[in-house]
Amino acid sequence: MRKLAYAAVIIGSFAILFAVGQAWRLKPETKTSRILHRGDYAILSTPAGQDVWLAVKPDDCYPIQKAVVEKDETYLKACADNQTAFPVAAGTRVKVLAEKVSRREVQILEGPLEGRTGWVEHEFLLPDPRPKM
């Protein structure tokens, strides 16, 4: 009788944990929803398709992205004038060089700014579906 009780507890626990695991995985990982890490290739992206601003230093990343969201053109112009940030066209292909919490250092792989590096919040990066170079 004891073995039956142990088996029932184990099977019941497994069923509960399986159900919880399925509920937490509400949206399975796809090629376009994955968080990118060092060595990954990505595309710069914004919801409205406007330029993505890259910060020169990782600590400047959040204030710059906040200014983009709030459409604070004065702050963005000051960043460009001080060379603490620069705009890059959405859709530009980049390679992730480093990561720091939610920020990613990227190297631009195409266009007039090719070879330049900067920091951006990971939410502005989409996995690049094209094959690696």
Image (spheres, grey):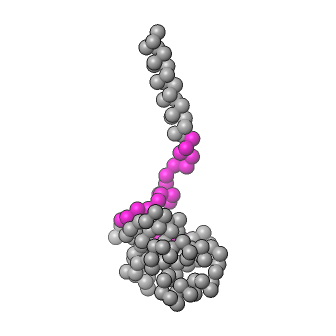
Is residue 126 among the parts visible in the rendering? no
Looking at the image, residue 76 sits to the left or right of residue 2; the answer is: right
Magenta stretch prevailing secondary structure = loop
Residue 9, position as x, y percentages in the image = 49, 22
At which x and y percent is residue 132? 36, 67
Give the number of callouts. Answer: 0
Q: Residue at image x 60%, y 69%?
A: 47
Quadrant of residue 114 in the image?
bottom left
User: In the image, is residue 14 above or below residue 20?
Assistant: above
- Magenta region includes residue 75: no
Q: Is residue 33 above or below residue 120?
A: above
Residue at image point 37% right, 64% down: 38
Residue that appears at 48% across and 83% down:
84
- The stretch in magenta equals 23-45
Where is 127 relative to 22, above or below? below
For the point 51% across and 58% down, the residue is: 33
